[in-house]
Amino acid sequence: MAIGYAKDQPTGFKNYLENIAIVGAGGQVGKFIVQALVANGKHKITALTREGSTNTVPAGVHSIQKIDYSQPSTIVEALKGQDALICTLSIRATDEAEKLSRAAAEAGVKWILPNEFGNSKNNEQIDRDIMIGVVKAKDRKLIEELGVSSWIGVATGFWYEYSLSVGPWSYGFDIKNRAVTFFDDGAKQINTTTWPQVGRGVANLLGLKVLPDDENDKSPHLSQFKNDFVCISSFKVSQQQIFESLLRVTGTSRDDWKVTTESAKERYEKGKVMLEAGDRTGFGLLLYSRVFYPDEAGQHPRVDNAALGLPEENLDEWTAVAVKMAKEDYFLKHVVPRTMG
């Protein structure tokens, strides 16, 4: 891919991003992104918040702009002068995602990190199977068709501490009741990422120079990920490896846990039936079980941690965080109220 060099750009070209806008700054992953951006100290950060939102925006944000999705002009105005837009939205916010992409194009925003933060496979079958993949692919295509912005999909796999703590419908673990359901043999590995690592990954990505200085510059740059995915990962692990970590962290043995097995395919199909019957838990079942299929849907084609200067993390440390979240009913206290609102 021909990308050019900074030395050949016209006068006034900035080889860095200065102004960053984020939607969802007070959300589950958004707050970690903002914290990492603030820690890096390279950008002026603007939080776009919906009129009436009660989410608390993390400290360090330079500006808070209220937007109204029923009046796209408010979004365009808020995005003027921004170099990049980060979208962290509910997976159900499909209309909002499209309006943001269109407004970004109208405002001249050059880079969009769309509402990805999941799968790294640009695979139509997987997209259809997990349902939300089709919507995300549509948004990426729209950004390209509008012809103003470039997208970078931040692929993280599922969030580790969240997915391990929320209950058996995700990674198959019921920590409070010491029960686990292995999908098939529990040995299929997936890439999964902690919230702080997601934040660091996004911040370090946007802190890269836009273009290489010249033909001799081999350092990482933003444009190498243009209209592609950047793949971030904390761990490449299987359920069995997670279970061993849980045993170490909790000081328990396998005999202390109820262990069952289920075909990943059958679990996926069960989730579809539940969802079609109106049980939203079924969506979690199908979404998570699909990444444990033999086609390695849950594995990144590569990991870009080194290019982004990301640290290695300790599995047991983050398993302990998940155990604490489970014991404190994080999901019931912090996630369910949002979905009911």
Image (cartoon, helix red, strand yellow):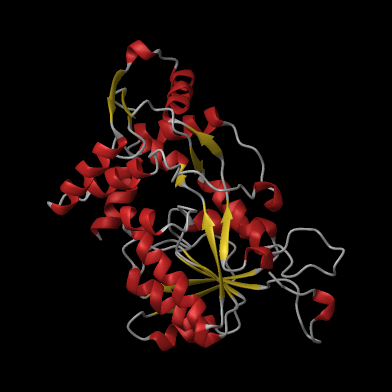
Q: Quadrant of residue 240?
A: top left
At 43% from the left and 34% from the top, the residue drawn is 322
At 57% from the left and 47% from the top, the residue drawn is 197
Image quarter where the C terminus lies is: bottom left
Q: Is residue 175 visible?
A: yes
Between residue 171 and residue 247, name the one nearer to us. Answer: 171
Q: Quadrant of residue 285?
A: top left
On the image, the x and y values in percent for residue 23 come to: 46, 68
Image quarter where the N terminus lies is: bottom right
Q: Does 63 sit left or right of 23 as displayed?
A: right
On the image, the x and y values in percent for residue 10 come to: 79, 86
Examine the rendered structure and indicate whether residue 257 appears above or below residue 286.
Answer: above
Q: Is residue 52 visible?
A: no
Count of all numbered marks drawn on residues in the image: 0
At 30% from the left and 56% from the top, the residue drawn is 338
Instruction: Kindly give the residue lying farthest to the right in the view shown.
Output: 216
